Image: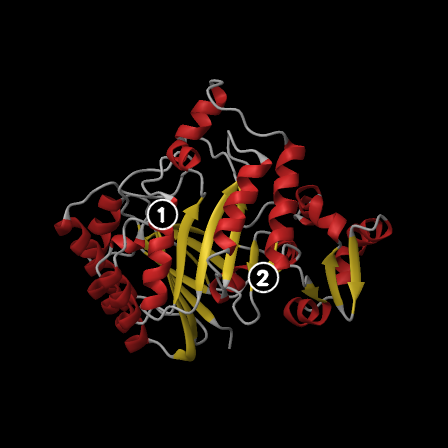
């Protein structure tokens, strides 16, 4: 039985970040918030959890730390009531500094949250303002202290590099400042400029300039050096963790395990079919409150698409892919399906094989974005 995750989307935000293209909703109306939390529970009650026990619940957003602890507790309780859960269930809550207090963090811990993911993004005040973040670094440090006092012994800190205006020294200061807080996990994401965002408009109009790609690569290398020097091992291209503290929820995505998505715009995957909910808040509430399915659409992945996705998701991880796992899952060997792609990459020193695993070399990691598309299927996915 495959382990299953549950993703719970909390869309509410105080402000939209300049780089954000997520499905969010800017409202402080407590009545609307309450309707939404009711709808999340109702949606869960009408859906099957998946083929295996729930090993992870992840509250993402949006800003889940705008939800009162009682709402988080109710959702966790509903999931546990209707589905078998792992004894070591991981429950993650994303939080923004400035939206939490010592009391709310104690409340989240009592509700069952045992992993906090804090969106710090930068230590530099000017960069935070450019991002349209609503906190400063002092508030981030304060929130980490409160989390520790509340008994959170598994804390992830997020940061972004490659933002307009950032220099290598800025990224070094941010990463070092985060490491000084002794997190169990660190996520360092290269900026992606998404169409339709305020940042994309600024870049297209010449009001913001992205760092040179070589400089961005230097930022990534230096951030990795600093992180690994204090015992945070890189286990995926953007993620570093202390032993035993890798993100179980992200592992589900990368290992192509099933997950259920609750809330507006949330995605689900049952091992073959991927589906997504209606994106607007009003549309989601109307469907769930009328007893209608929240799903908007979906697609069924054919065998070729599943194999390709399995490989390129696996190669994002430092440990790569177990050849035996691939053959057991798909009934063919990794070499027989992708040998023509793998062999030239191996000869070039970009891919290595050892102890039954295929993984990118350090040089391969540097050019990952050029390598992974070679494993994509030639034919389109079959849509349901």
Instruction: Please identify the residue farthest to the right as the structure is shown.
Output: 347
* Horizontal relation, residue 344 to residue 80: left or right: right
> What's the CA distance linking mark 1 and mark 2?
23 Å
Give above or below for 270 relative to 222.
below
At mark 1, the secondary structure is helix
Q: Which mark is residue 138?
A: 1
Question: Badge 2 is on which residue?
Answer: 232
Give above or below for 192 relative to 236.
above
Colour mapping used in the image = secondary structure
Q: Residue at x 15, y 46 (%)?
A: 29
**Which residue is more in the foreground, 51 or 110?**
110
**Which residue is more in the foreground, 148 or 117?**
148
Instruction: Please identify the residue farthest to the top as the structure is shown.
Output: 205
Percent x, y for residue 313?
Answer: 61, 56
**Residue 88 is drawn in which quadrant?**
bottom left
Residue 90 seen from this side = yes
Percent x, y for residue 358?
Answer: 74, 62
Q: Residue at x 76, y 70 (%)?
A: 356
**Which residue is more in the foreground, 327 or 225?**
225
Q: Earlier in the sequence, mark 1 or mark 2?
A: 1
Disc 1, disc 2: CB below 8 Å? no
Percent x, y for residue 364?
Answer: 74, 49
């Amino acid at each position: 039985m495959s382990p299953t995750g549950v993703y719970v989307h909390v869309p509410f935000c105080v402000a939209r970040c300049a780089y954000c293209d997520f499905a969010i909703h800017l409202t402080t109306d407590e009545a609307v918030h309450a309707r939404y939390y009711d709808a999340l529970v109702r949606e869960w009650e009408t859906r099957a959890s998946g083929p295996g026990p729930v090993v992870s619940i992840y509250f993402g957003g949006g800003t889940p730390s705008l939800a009162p602890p009682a709402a988080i507790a109710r959702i966790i309780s509903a999931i546990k009531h209707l589905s078998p859960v792992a004894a070591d269930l991981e429950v993650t809550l994303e939080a923004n500094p400035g939206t939490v207090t010592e009391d709310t963090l104690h409340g989240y811990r009592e509700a069952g949250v045992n992993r906090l993911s804090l969106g710090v993004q930068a230590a530099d005040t000017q960069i935070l303002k450019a991002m349209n973040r609503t906190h400063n670094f002092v508030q981030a440090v304060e929130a980490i202290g409160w989390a520790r006092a509340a008994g959170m012994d598994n804390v992830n800190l997020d940061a972004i590099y490659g933002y307009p205006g950032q220099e290598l020294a800025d990224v070094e200061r941010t990463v070092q400042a985060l490491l000084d807080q002794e997190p169990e996990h660190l996520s360092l994401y290269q900026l992606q400029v998404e169409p339709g965002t305020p940042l994309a408009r600024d870049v297209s109009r010449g009001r913001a300039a992205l760092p040179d790609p070589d400089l961005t690569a230097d930022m990534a290398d230096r951030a990795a050096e600093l992180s690994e020097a204090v015992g945070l091992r890189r286990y995926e291209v953007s993620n570093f963790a202390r032993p035993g503290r890798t993100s179980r929820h992200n592992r589900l995505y990368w290992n192509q395990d099933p997950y259920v998505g609750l809330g507006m715009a949330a995605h689900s995957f049952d091992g073959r079919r991927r589906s997504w909910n209606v994106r607007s808040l009003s549309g989601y509430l109307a469907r769930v409150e009328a007893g209608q399915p929240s799903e908007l659409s979906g697609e069924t992945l054919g065998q070729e698409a599943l194999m390709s996705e399995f490989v390129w998701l696996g190669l994002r991880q430092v440990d790569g892919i177990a050849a035996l796992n691939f053959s057991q899952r798909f009934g063919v060997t990794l070499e027989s399906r992708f040998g023509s792609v793998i062999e030239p990459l191996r000869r070039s020193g970009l891919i290595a094989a050892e102890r039954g695993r295929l993984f990118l070399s350090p040089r391969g990691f540097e050019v990952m974005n050029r390598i992974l598309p070679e494993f994509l299927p030639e034919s389109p996915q079959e849509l349901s």
